[in-house]
Image (cartoon, coloured by chain):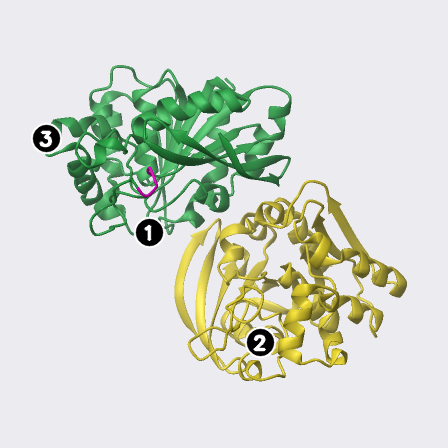
Chain colours: A green, B yellow
């Protein structure tokens, strides 16, 4: 692992790092906010998954999370949104919603994507192995959250790995990729036309077929002036599935807020306190 | 004035606006955070001037100021760093420290800059006239702050207009452009070789020749791991001039912090409280 840069921030530091990813067959970058408390003992780790077109830098620059994370003693890890590099295939039209910047946190099975696009394995296996080797995070206290495509990632990864991620939250997540244009396009390219293979990456379908109901409530914030709400996000489907399956969900609908980071940063503190409360219990 | 976009943020909103600037002979963009309190009555206005290469968006995205501004009821205005547009001349080598993105908050007197580069008049006269017409800011309660080149702008504009800007602060300001490479280059291009004309745009020189000492202390934060501290910033010269002239200065030196927005956002709350304290007195 190579350090790209480190920056003092509140009592801790924001760092950017690079390493060879085996599962994605390329170099990957990620960022970590290390709070001051990590000098004394291992701290809880919350992984943030960003949305379409973002990188590992977006959350650290725009999220406004460091103040509260330093207060609560949370390590924050932000992941890139896809594999990158010259050898990594992109969408033929370089569309923003497929290929580079649009990895959808899944393991692709279809050519040409299946050689590089293994973001599910990257987030759940490869990056944590590196992280807990290099940083003072506590692997028994992990949470996951994200925005939009990354909210989809956080819900699907969190729900499928309850023994690892004890706390889950999302900002304006894509709640049912099988039922929206962004998801339909990406899942068809990455996973092929057989929609049975899509269910593992659809939070609403996962809830319907859940073996283990999460112990703690999920927190989801949704702006009601979000320009993607009507076509892409489907919080109502997710809410109904959670209700039917007995999954505790705190879904908050906020009048006037849109899809961007002014919305996210407004509610960031609530999310960090949600994770800290669960992980310190 | 045209609204480009508006975004709910905390209890208020972040907006981006465009208008025809007469003094800069081009279209200019700026951004405003309007706190919830402005619905009831005019609120204090703090103008933020950004550094080299930045735009009117930088502060709103990276500064992390909205939470506290909404709490304190402060309107925040962020200005672009130069005139823009096809007709506006740029540095021949498109250097980052001259021309576009590098207006240095002065009125250029030399060709080809003198037709467009009037950022001093823009910040002190044209923008406020528009602002107090369109937004519920209180013109009797104004403060100014900024970063690096914008810290230079805040100090020089604030010190030269004490009747307008009652509170002044800066992050890592260029304290004496006459004594650093960035300033030397810009002042020579914009103002010509006669260094007498440079003194109006050098905070340290302004302090030395000040008629009216500011009533309230200036707040300046400086990171001691700042990559530009040794060559460009000269806080020691400014501190000595303030000391000699009896200007109250709270200059805080912070070990480990660099020149970027992770530093700025860490101390943003202190700056907003500094302005609010003075403007509510």
Question: Disc 1 marks which residue?
Answer: A225
Residue B218 painted magenta: no
Residue at 22 percent across and 43 percent down: it is: A182
**Viewer-side label of 2, 3:** 3
Query: The N terminus of chain B lies in which quarter of the figure?
Result: bottom left
**The C terminus of chain B lies in which quarter of the figure?**
bottom right
Extreme residue in the left direction:
A194
Q: In the image, are marks 1 and 2 on the same chain?
A: no
The answer to whether the residue labelled 3 contacts the one labelled 1, judged by CB atoms less than 8 Å apart, is no
Q: Residue at x 49, y 77 (%)?
A: B89
**Which marked residue is nearer to the observer: mark 1 or mark 2?**
2
**Disc number placed over residue A194 in the picture, else none:** 3
Please state if B89 lies on the left or on the right of A13 as rendered: left
Tell which of B259 and B92 is nearer to you. Answer: B92
Residues drawn in magenta: A82-86
Residue picked out by circle 2? B122
* Quadrant in the picture for residue B17: bottom left
**Could you tell me which chain the residue with mark 2 belongs to?**
B
């Amino acid at each position: 692992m190579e350090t790209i840069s480190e920056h003092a921030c509140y009592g801790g530091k924001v760092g950017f790092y690079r390493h060879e990813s085996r599962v994605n067959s390329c170099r990957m970058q990620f960022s970590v906010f290390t709070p001051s408390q990590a000098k004394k003992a291992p701290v809880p780790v919350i992984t943030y998954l960003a949305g379409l077109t973002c990188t590992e830098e977006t959350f650290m620059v725009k999220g406004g999370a460091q103040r509260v994370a330093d207060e609560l003693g949370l390590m924050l890890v932000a992941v890139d949104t896809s594999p990158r590099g010259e050898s990594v295939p992109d969408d033929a039209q370089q569309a923003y919603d497929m290929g580079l910047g649009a990895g959808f946190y899944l393991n692709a099975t279809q050519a040409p994507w299946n050689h590089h696009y293994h973001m599910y394995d990257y987030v759940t296996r490869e990056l944590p192995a590196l992280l807990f080797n290099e940083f003072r995070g506590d692997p028994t206290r992990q949470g996951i959250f994200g925005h939009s495509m990354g909210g989809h990632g956080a819900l699907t990864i969190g729900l499928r790995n309850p023994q690892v991620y004890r706390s889950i939250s999302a900002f304006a997540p894509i709640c049912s990729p099988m039922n929206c244009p962004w998801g339909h396009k990406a899942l068809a390219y990455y996973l092929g036309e057989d929609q049975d293979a899509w269910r593992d990456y659809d939070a609403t379908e996962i809830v319907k077929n859940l073996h283990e109901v999460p112990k703690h409530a999920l927190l989801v914030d949704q702006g009601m002036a979000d320009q993607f709400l009507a076509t892409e996000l489907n919080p109502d489907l997710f809410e109904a599935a959670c209700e039917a399956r007995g999954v505790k969900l705190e879904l908050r609908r906020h009048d006037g807020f849109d899809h961007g980071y002014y919305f996210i940063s407004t509610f960031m503190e609530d999310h960090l306190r949600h994770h800290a409360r669960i992980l310190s219990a």
